[in-house]
Image: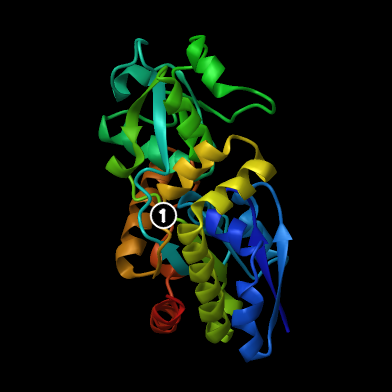
Amino acid sequence: MTVTIGVHSSNPSLYYLARLDFLAEELAPLGESGEFHHYTDGTRTGALLADGTIDLGGTGSTPPVTAQAAGHDLVYTAVSAPRPDHGALLVLADGPVTGITGLKGGTVVLGIGSWQTHLLAKALHAEGLSYAEDVRPVRPAPGSDPAAQLRAGEIAGWIAQGAELAAALRTGEFRVLVRTGDVITDRSVFFARRDFAEGRPEVVAAITAALARADAWVAANPAEAAAIAAADLGGSTEDWRTALTALPWRLEPATAAFVAEQQEAADIFHGVGFIDRTITVADAHLPALEAPVAAALAKAV
């Protein structure tokens, strides 16, 4: 039987897994094969699981919450260790915004629906401000340059990640207003359809082992991994290497502690209207997966 894994460039573990042989190697002993479905927008992962296009995918912390709120029956399979330096909320170094409250009434460019929504919503909430009412969140327009917009004073803030963050900080023109790790754990999150996760836990474990091996390869080969990303996605090899070496490259089972993190995010999202109903994140937690996933991770590394 063929297992289909969703891949998009915003999830680094999946991005590199699709370029290595580890998935086939881990699935072969189970008599399974794997294929990759490539798409550009990670916020579609829940819908792709629901319609059967993919069996398992991965994103940041926000898309599984919005997918659950949309009624998609998903199960968390694994998570990365916290990624405190994966991204940051930037402002102009010599500009007028000196704290979160300075964003009030301003425009913030971010990946709406990604982990970046979680970061901004929680950072504002901590200061008594609302994501829905006190700032204007906007997605980067195709072909736009948020760094130039920030430099020109057209926007108040910009949440950057990866190589674009490294490139922006290298200029000295921008200042980190909010470090991601000071607000959220910003984990990479992997999840599957419930029927797949419950019916084939050994396959889920094998996929997780393959992801862990891909992570280990990147950690051991940062220059080669950076060159791949720069050639494929743009940016400099130097900036990609900076971004990749800032990541933990370590996976963990999805535990009750992680569920609590997600529930906090879901409650904030509902409070500001980003999701239209309350959800119980624990409904997407399958404790029976923890042991086989933990065993697969221990074997993989």
Mark 1 is on which residue type?
Arg
Query: Horizontal and vertical percent for residue 144?
Result: 64, 23
Query: Horizontal and vertical percent for residue 207?
Result: 56, 75
Which of these two is toward me, 70 or 106? 106
Left or right: where does residue 53 sit relative to residue 296? right
Which of these two is toward me, 184 or 95? 95
Rendered residue at 54%/86% (across/down): 202
Rendered residue at 59%/81% (across/down): 26
Residue 112 seen anywhere in this rendered image of the structure: no
Quadrant in which the N terminus is drawn:
bottom right
Residue bearing mark 1: 187
Using the rendered view, name the quadrant where residue 195 is placed.
bottom right
Query: Horizontal and vertical percent for residue 6?
Result: 65, 62
Vertical arrangement, residue 296 with respect to residue 86, above or below: below
Vertical arrangement, residue 21 with respect to residue 202, above or below: above
Residue 168 seen anywhere in this rendered image of the structure: yes
Query: Horizontal and vertical percent for residue 186?
Result: 39, 49
Q: How is the image coloured?
A: rainbow
Which of these two is toward me, 203 or 218? 218
Rendered residue at 57%/48% (across/down): 10
Local packing at callout 1 (Cα closer than 10 Å; few below 14, some 14-19, many 20+) is: many
Vertical arrangement, residue 176 with respect to residue 153, above or below: below
